[in-house]
């Protein structure tokens, strides 16, 4: 018989209103010691707002927060952290011009005497906490020089350093690899074993269920359901967060049999972070018009490097890339876009959007050449194309003039995809297109991909989500250590087989047999 959980942190009848818009409506939410509470909801459901109130970033319009059963009013995030409530933000709050150790100890320096910072102790502590996360970085490295995944690890390390009683994680795995997520889960279980309460917010439903003990669902600012994690599944969550059935999350697409549009022959690509290692090793494949091809693989499989090499963002060492028979060896990014191949990058915040521009300006940015006549941009043609695109991608409610930064993550991702489509591509490359988006937006993106494929567009996308890999592409290619480890048509394989192939087991077996 399980010992009753002790509630540490609570929201009581919390309402939050911005102007005339309610973000939260009378929410009661409990977080228990030694347990992981997964919070689900679509973009705009109020998840981040609730987390901001619980961590002292925002104050409720009405209602209150309780800590250990007593009403408490956090005046700042620092005040909340001093009382044992820390948060790992979805949008990183690090200082890129400071080192890792300086970020971890910012405003919490270890002093060796009056006005003297004990930098050696800070460095040793930083190294130890990074090692516990299996990230062996130099504490003196500038955060701005790290990859997005490494920066997320530093954000998590900073929260762990505060020895919180309640740790709130808002999309902590957004930039992490599969192996980094495994480490994160190990650390979370160690924390809960020591009595720490964890709130885990994620758009990846299966991932969050894997680590959760309790689940809660927000919808339109209201808490609509709570349950023990063992008693629910993804379908239960989808039914409560959206109006869709789980089966409606994935498109019903008939595989096309068009002409070959993309061909790779013996492609070799070095790992940009480690040139002595091959990210892609002697890879050959073809893609046809109207076909949706999925690329699935674990950490180090080379799936992102493959798409970036196709788009011209990183060079290939050898081999050929042919677009409708045209070699792309000497073609740069702009040339490849002009020839009909465009990439939607995996990090929309860093590489996909200009945050200071409007939705319309972001949409038209890559395709301005279409609207130029006699060295001038035809604003009427640009406006018509942008309006047509924003209707097609259903992004945002405030039209093309809205700041793109004001959109939800899902709508921002649709804008990045819409911008790529405005270049009229023949091959659309998408790196983890559903990363960090809600269930409805995820379904919209896959429906958009299927609709464009029906019109002859070749779509190649990467994913680290097994369910997406099994249900979305017409043809699934599994990469392991930069080589093609398996190829399946939709419905031909199982999750278990996919896991076995993607971890390189099949390759090791073949090598042993050849030996």
Image (cartoon, grey):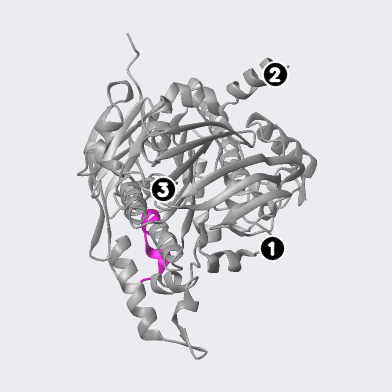
Residue that carries the numbered disc 1 in the rendered image: 330
- The quadrant of the picture occupied by the C terminus is top right
Q: Residues within 10 Å of mark 1 (few under 14, many from 20)?
A: few
Residue at (36, 71) in percent of width and height: 402
Query: What secondary structure is the stretch in magenta mostly built from?
Result: helix
Residue 459 position (above or below residue 465): below
Residue 269 position (above or below residue 368): above
Q: Are marks 1 and 2 in contact (CB under 8 Å)?
A: no
Q: Are marks 1 and 3 in contact (CB under 8 Å)?
A: no
Residue that carries the numbered disc 3 in the rendered image: 291
Which circle marks residue 514 in the picture?
2
- Distance between the Cα atoms at labels 3 and 2? 34 Å
> Which range of residues does the magenta coloring cover?
402-411
SS state under label 3: loop
Residue 264 seen in this snapshot: yes
Residue at (31, 71) in percent of width and height: 388
Residue 403 magenta-highlighted: yes
């Amino acid at each position: 018989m399980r010992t009753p959980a002790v509630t540490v942190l609570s929201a009581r009848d919390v309402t939050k209103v911005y102007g005339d818009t309610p973000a939260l409506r009378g929410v009661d939410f409990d977080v228990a010691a030694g347990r992981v509470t997964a919070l689900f909801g679509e973009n705009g459901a109020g998840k981040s707002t609730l987390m901001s109130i619980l961590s002292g970033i925002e104050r409720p319009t009405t209602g209150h927060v309780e800590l250990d059963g007593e009403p408490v009013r956090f005046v700042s995030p620092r005040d909340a952290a001093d009382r044992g409530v820390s948060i790992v933000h979805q949008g990183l709050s690090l200082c890129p011009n400071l080192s890792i150790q300086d970020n971890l100890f910012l405003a919490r320096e270890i002093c060796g005497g009056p006005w003297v910072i004990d930098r050696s102790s800070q460095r040793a502590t930083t190294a130890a906490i990074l090692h516990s996360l299996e990230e062996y970085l130099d504490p003196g490295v500038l955060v701005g020089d790290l990859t997005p995944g490494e920066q997320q690890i530093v954000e998590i390390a900073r929260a762990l350093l505060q020895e919180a009683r309640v740790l709130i994680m808002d999309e902590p795995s957004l930039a992490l690899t599969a192996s980094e997520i495994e480490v994160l889960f190990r650390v979370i279980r160690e924390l809960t074993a020591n009595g720490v309460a964890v709130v885990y917010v994620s758009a990846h439903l299966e991932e969050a269920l894997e680590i959760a003990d309790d689940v809660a669902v927000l919808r339109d600012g209201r808490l609509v359901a709570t349950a023990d994690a063992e008693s629910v599944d993804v379908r239960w969550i989808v039914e409560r967060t959206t109006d869709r059935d789980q089966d409606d999350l994935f498109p019903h697409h008939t595989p096309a049999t068009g002409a070959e549009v993309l061909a790779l022959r013996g492609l070799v690509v070095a790992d940009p972070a480690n040139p002595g290692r091959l990210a892609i090793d002697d890879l050959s494949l073809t893609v046809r018009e109207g076909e949706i091809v999925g690329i699935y693989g674990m950490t180090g499989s080379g799936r992102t490097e493959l798409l970036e090499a196709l788009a011209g963002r990183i060079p290939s060492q050898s081999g050929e890339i042919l677009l409708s028979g045209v070699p792309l060896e000497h073609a740069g990014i702009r040339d490849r876009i002009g020839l009909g191949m465009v990439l939607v990058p995996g990090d929309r915040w860093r590489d996909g959007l200009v945050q200071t521009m409007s939705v319309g300006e972001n949409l038209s940015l890559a395709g301005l050449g279409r609207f130029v006549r006699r060295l001038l941009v035809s604003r009427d043609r640009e406006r018509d194309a942008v309006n047509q695109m924003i209707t097609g991608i259903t992004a945002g409610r405030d039209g093309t003039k809205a700041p793109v930064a004001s959109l939800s993550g899902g709508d921002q991702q649709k804008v990045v995809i819409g911008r790529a489509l405005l270049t009229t591509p023949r091959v659309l490359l998408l790196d983890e297109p559903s990363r960090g988006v809600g269930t409805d937006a995820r379904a919209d993106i896959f429906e958009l991909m299927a609709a464009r494929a029906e019109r002859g567009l070749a779509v190649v996308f990467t994913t680290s989500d097994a369910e997406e890999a099994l249900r979305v592409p017409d043809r699934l290619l599994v990469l392991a250590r930069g080589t093609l480890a398996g190829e399946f048509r939709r419905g031909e394989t199982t999750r278990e087989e996919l896991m076995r192939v993607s971890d390189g087991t099949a390759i090791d077996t073949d090598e042993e047999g050849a030996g």
